[in-house]
Each structure stands twice: as C-alpha cells, then as structure tokens.
Image: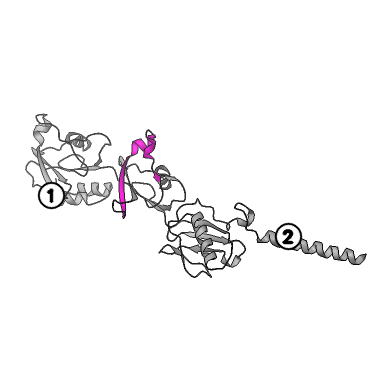
Amino acid sequence: MRVKESGACMRLLALTLVLAWAALAQPPKPGSPAAAPVPGSSLPAQAIGPDDLISVSVYGAPDLNRTIRVQSDGLIRLPLLKSPIEAEGLNPAALEAAIASALREDRILKNPYVAVAIVEYHSRPISVSGAVKLPVVFQADGSTTLLSALAQAQGLREDAGREILVSQPQPGPDGKPATFTRRILVRGLIDGTDPSLNLKLHGGEEVRVPEMGKIYVVGNVKKPGVFPLQAGAETTVLQALALAEGLMPFAASQAFIYRHDDAGTKNEIPFELAKLMQRKSPDVPLMADDIIYIPQNHGKKLSAAALEKIVLFGSTAGATALIYNLPR
C-alpha cells in the first residue's frame, strides 16, 4: 500500500515539474512584469537616431540584456549576432521585431521576446538662440511645441524683435535633406490668436529670435544714441530726432542716412534737413540699422567708415558710448 502511495506521489511531482517547465518556456505577453524593459527607460517612443541610448531586454537570455548607444552610422551590435542591426529611423517596436528576427535567423533563440525602450535621446536636438534669456539646446523627448521651447529658454528678452525664425529639416524636392524656415509673429504666438503658429517640434529645429531693429542717431543732436524701432509701426527721421531730443545749434541744412542694401552695399542717402524741419518736404521712413548723421553747419563731415564702426560695435550701451565720443 505504501509502495502505491509513493508511486502516486512521484507521478504527481513529475507532472508538476512538466507544467512548471511549460509555463517558463512560454514567451511572456506584452505588459506582463517579465516583459518590462529595464528601469529608467520611460521616454516617449519616437524614431531612433545616432547617439541615442536604448535598452534591450530579451526574455530568458539575460546575457543579451544591456544598454546600447546607437553608433554614428545608425547601427547597434549585440553579442552572439553575426551582423549589426540598423536602428536609425526605427521606432522601438520596429527595432524589437528586427532584433527578434536576427536572433531567429542566427539560431540563437527559437521564439525570442524582445523589449526595447529609449533611455536618452541625443539625435533630436532643438536649439533656441537670439534674444532669449537663456539660449539653450535640449532634446525633443516627446511632443514639443514652439512655446514650450521658448519656455526652456526662459522666455524672450525685452529687446526681442517682432518675429521668430524657425528652421525645420524637411525632405527637398530631390529627396535630399533640406531646411525650411518659417517666420512666426511674436504677438500672434503669445496672444494665442492663431494656434497654428505654435508649431510642433520633433527635433532638428533651430529657433532664432532676432533682436528688435535699431536706428542710430549721431552728430549734431542733443542726445546721440541707439534707439529701437517700434514693432508694427513706421519710424521716421522726425521721430528719430525726437528720440535724440532734437538738434543742437548750427546743425547743417543737409543730413545723411547710411543704409545697407540686400547685397551688403553701403549707400549714402542725403536729405534736406532744413526743409524737413520746416515741414516743406515729406518725412523720411527709416529701416533697421539705419544711421542718421547730422553734421555741423561749418564742421568737417564725418566719414562713412567712421559711422560704420557704430553699427559693428554690437551692444546698445557700447554703441551709445562710441557715439558720444565721435566728433559732431
């Protein structure tokens, strides 16, 4: 009787072991604890690029579990595999399938289950520069908008211009990479009047915020200086002279505007100052970086080369200091 009970126990134990082995041999279902990727890899799934850091977890093969940096040529290499795997341009799910296929083809695992997750993105930089409080380069690790990119740069400076330039990589007509630049009005973006201005950024974009346009008033005026152009409004010579607090005595009857054209050529534009002040000639509109020069009536005219140094000087404070040191 005891022999029969012992035999039954042995058969029960054998059956238990077989069922346990069968359970372990089954690949885990997605979402189960055994299929979870390595800790720390919780970034949104996007196309993988060079220098991205990814985690690879292969169920039942701990020697293949590792964190891998995608090479500059877009490939990754796993131990035991004969050939590298193309990772660039794939999302994590597609790379999982590619790794599983390679493991089957090389007869390393019969029915592998592979989990891939993104640990760090390094192939999707967004740069924000120009008239922002903190120029920055960061990685697009999910849905990023133009406003959130500006928030990363701590917002616009007070001297920011009226437009934001966003350069985005796009395929050209011949299929080769090209760059498309779009101009976004600051007021429309900030006010939210047109939601389409808050562009979606996916990485590879350059956001540039030009400084507000400036005009320079030098020579025989009471307060030579550098003055901002008013956004959305025309600035004229009379307005510029008002900002410079008017003319000094013995100002010449003829004055000059120095302006660069689109080709970079420097042009001297004379105008009759006396007639303008007497309202006998129309006011003259100005453009960004114009230099208004008011000579003395009997003084030596300042050379255009000397005036050019003002524009090249850089900061408003520095340019103002240089203007005050110029002869009038």
Find residue 147 and report its horizontal and vertical position in percent: 41, 42
Q: Which residues are magenta?
A: 173-200
Disc 2 on helix, strand or loop? helix
What's the CA distance linking mark 1 and mark 2? 93 Å
Find residue 44 and report its horizontal and vertical position in percent: 50, 50
Q: Quadrant of the C terminus?
A: top left
Residue 252: within the magenta?
Answer: no
**Is 235 positioned to the left or the right of 133 in the image?**
left
| Residue nearest the observer in this picture, 139 or 134 | 139
Disc 1 on helix, strand or loop? helix
**Is 312 positioned to the left or the right of 99 in the image?**
left
- Does residue 320 lie above or below 5 as drawn? above
| Residue nearest the observer in this picture, 234 or 25 | 25
What colour scheme does the image use?
Answer: one colour
Q: Dot 1 surroundings within 10 Å: few (below 14), some, or many (20 or more)?
A: some
Q: Earlier in the sequence, mark 1 or mark 2?
A: 2
**Is 199 positioned to the left or the right of 271 in the image?**
right
As drawn, the label of residue 11 is none
Find residue 123 and report its horizontal and vertical position in percent: 42, 57
Q: Amino acid at mark 1?
A: Ala
| Residue nearest the observer in this picture, 42 or 176 | 176
Identified at 42% across, 62% down, the residue is: 74
Q: Which residue is mark 1?
A: 304
Q: Which residue is mark 2?
A: 19
Residue 195: within the magenta?
Answer: yes
